[in-house]
Image (spheres, helix red, strand yellow):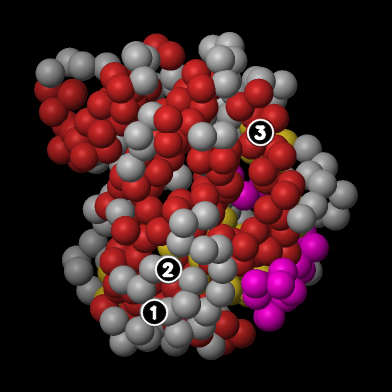
Amino acid sequence: MTHPAHGAVTLAEVWRGPFLESAHQGHAVICDDTGQIVQSWGNPDAMVLPRSSSKMIQALPLLRSGAAAANGLTPEHLALACASHQGAAIHSQKVGAWLDHIGCVDDDFRCGPQVSRDDDVRDAMIRAHEAPCRIHNNCSGKHAGFLTLGKHLDAGPDYVDPAHPVQTACLEAFEEMTGETSPGFGVDGCSAPNYAATMHGMARAMARYASADNDSPQGQLRNAMALHPDLVAGEGRACTRLMRAMNNGTAIKTGAEGYFVAMLPEQKLGVALKITDGATRASECAIAQILVKLGALDPDHPEALAYTNGPIQNWDGLTTGALRAAPTLL
């Protein structure tokens, strides 16, 4: 298998004064609704784990099986199923209510406990000497979806086992949407299998979501994400900030190790992006510039500028440089 950095190009740059101090390389692909590449940077055939950027694909069997309808799931539930959330009260309370609704408890989750990334919740739990729960895990919404599907299928409790019906359904959906046979998987941070695809394959999948009818399973998931950006990530996070700034139905999703995807329904385009050194700051910068390039994000919007040309400040508040999208993306 080709090394994932093979053919990568610079997508984001760090400047300090007049000096280029650091550069982040990666791959990016834009696909249209026929699955063809409109534009690419780096190597479209790079085989990469999309990590949490594939959650809307992992949520697809939840709708196709009838489990979502049978359990009365709303767009809020669907957004949480696609989320990498902060573990803020808005997230944990809604996931907790979902668990109650399907007759499950925190110990039924197969994701590990995680300290909340919301400062207020974290600090309050520390003061109260409370241990983090699995519901605070950033993937608990996805796992609530897995549990819902597993109960609907009357399958066993070990829903993260690659041979479990929940995961075989996820793999089937993944290969259908990407148009590829996956060469395998890695175990994700939440213990679920995460299947690999080429950059072209993931961009193709996102284009299929972007061009899907609103009432289709793909369209429902895309629209739920765009409608509830606060549930997909949380305050201060790029996914939430940029979706709010666009407010045009475009849905975006980050993934660990510098991955990012976008679904642009107005343009019927899908985007997949990977920074090969895994830097989140670079993936956020590059995806924002691509969204600007495609006309989904106003280049002069403060949130756009915060990512495409974000100031770097030192401890005394002095602006010492900037994190900028590379010239190749302009």
Write the residue at 72% across / 59% down. Answer: 201
Res 282 seen here: no
Residue 13 vertical placement versus 225 (above, below): below
Rendered image: mark on residue 250: 2
Q: CA distance from mark 2 to mark 1?
A: 9 Å
Q: Residues within 10 Å of mark 2 (few under 14, many from 20)?
A: many
Residue 242 location (% of width, % of height): 35, 67
Q: Secondary structure at mark 3?
A: helix
**Residue 310 tag number:** none
Marked residue nearer the N-terminal end (1 or 3):
3
Residue to which mark 1 is pinned: 297
Residue at the location (71% across, 55% down)? 178
Res 131 quadrant in image? top left
Secondary structure beneath label 2: loop
Which region of the structure is painted magenta? 31-51
| Quadrant of the image occupied by residue 69 | top left
